[in-house]
Structure formats: C-alpha cells, structure tokens
Image (tube, helix red, strand yellow):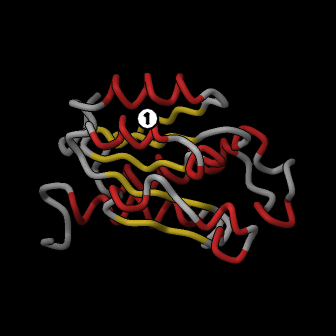
Amino acid sequence: MTSARGTLHVLNGPNLNLLGEREPHIYGADTLGDVEELARRTGGELEFDVECFQSNHEGALVDEIQRIRRTSVGVVINAGAYTHTSVAIRDALANLEAPFVEVHISNVHAREPFRHHSYLSDKAAAVIVGCGVQGYEFAVRRLDALVPGGEIAV
C-alpha cells in the first residue's frame, strides 16, 4: 500500500549497522533497527511510507541515491564518515529531485576537527546534529514541512 504523500528514504552509511554496540558512550544504546522503526513510525504519523537502506560502501550509497532520485519525496541521510570525505555522495544528492536532511547522532562540532567539515551540508535542506537518534524523527518532521501538504509553508 502506498501512502498518499509518497515515500521518504532514510539512508545510513558506514558503521551505523553497529549502533547499540559501537561506542555507546557517543552513539547511545539504540540499534539501527530502533532508528528505522522510529523513522517509519514518525513517517506513518505524517502519511509517508518510509524505506530504509544502510551500507558500509560508498558506491552502494551512490547507487541507492541514484535509484531513488526521481521517486523519493524526501531523504534523511546519515552518511557517517563519508560526510567528511565523499564528493561522490554529494554529487549524487545534488541530483535528487527532493529535499534531503543531513543527520548526525553525535554533535560532530564537539568532536575531532576532521568531523567539522561536511561535503553535504551546503546542499541539505537542514542539518541536525547532536540530538541522538531523535534527530531522525526531527528530520522526518522537517521533511514533512518541506513536502507538499506539510504543516509549514516554506
């Protein structure tokens, strides 16, 4: 069954499959499954279908962005470490026909200096950092405001 408002896509990059195990003092105890369920639940409340994808491989993320570039109504992306290194992901996101929101679970600006630069931020409709996994909910709600029929006119 397809939602009246279309499909949002939640994309996660390298090491996010280890959420709940990897550095819980930074990333918390929630798993990737918990994140995906939060995004689906929030999207469902807003009448969106939500599809989730995770890969540790840059090319797979680029392929997925290209696959959804004309069909997605909005994208939430946590590109993980590729945020700070990937021009390829940036270029793929620039070809989306929908807005995207960049998410980081930790506050990257309070961490190592190499994490302060993002190749994605200047193309993003919004950037959410340091809100834990709740940042994904915020991102879905922000896309709600940007997609036709949303609560806030932009």
Identify which amino acid the numbered label 1 is placed on: Glu
Kindly identify which residue carries mark 1.
51
Give me the residue at 42% from left, 60% from top: 121
Looking at the rendered structure, the number of numbered marks drawn on it comes to 1
Q: Position of residue 51 (x, y in %)?
A: 43, 35
- Residue 140, quarter of picture: bottom left
Left or right of 45? Residue 119 is right
Give me the residue at 59% from left, 52% from top: 84
Work out whether 42 lies above or below 77. below
- The N terminus - image quarter: top left
Left or right of 154? Residue 45 is right
Work out whether 21 lies above or below 132. above
Q: Position of residue 58 (x, y in %)?
A: 57, 30
Give me the residue at 18% from left, 73% from top: 152
Q: Position of residue 114 (x, y in %)?
A: 68, 61
Q: Position of residue 57 (x, y in %)?
A: 62, 27
- The C terminus - image quarter: bottom left
34 vs 61, nearest the viewer: 61
- Residue 149, quarter of picture: bottom left
102 vs 1, nearest the viewer: 102
Give me the residue at 56% from left, 46% from top: 79
Secondary structure state at the residue bearing disc 1: strand
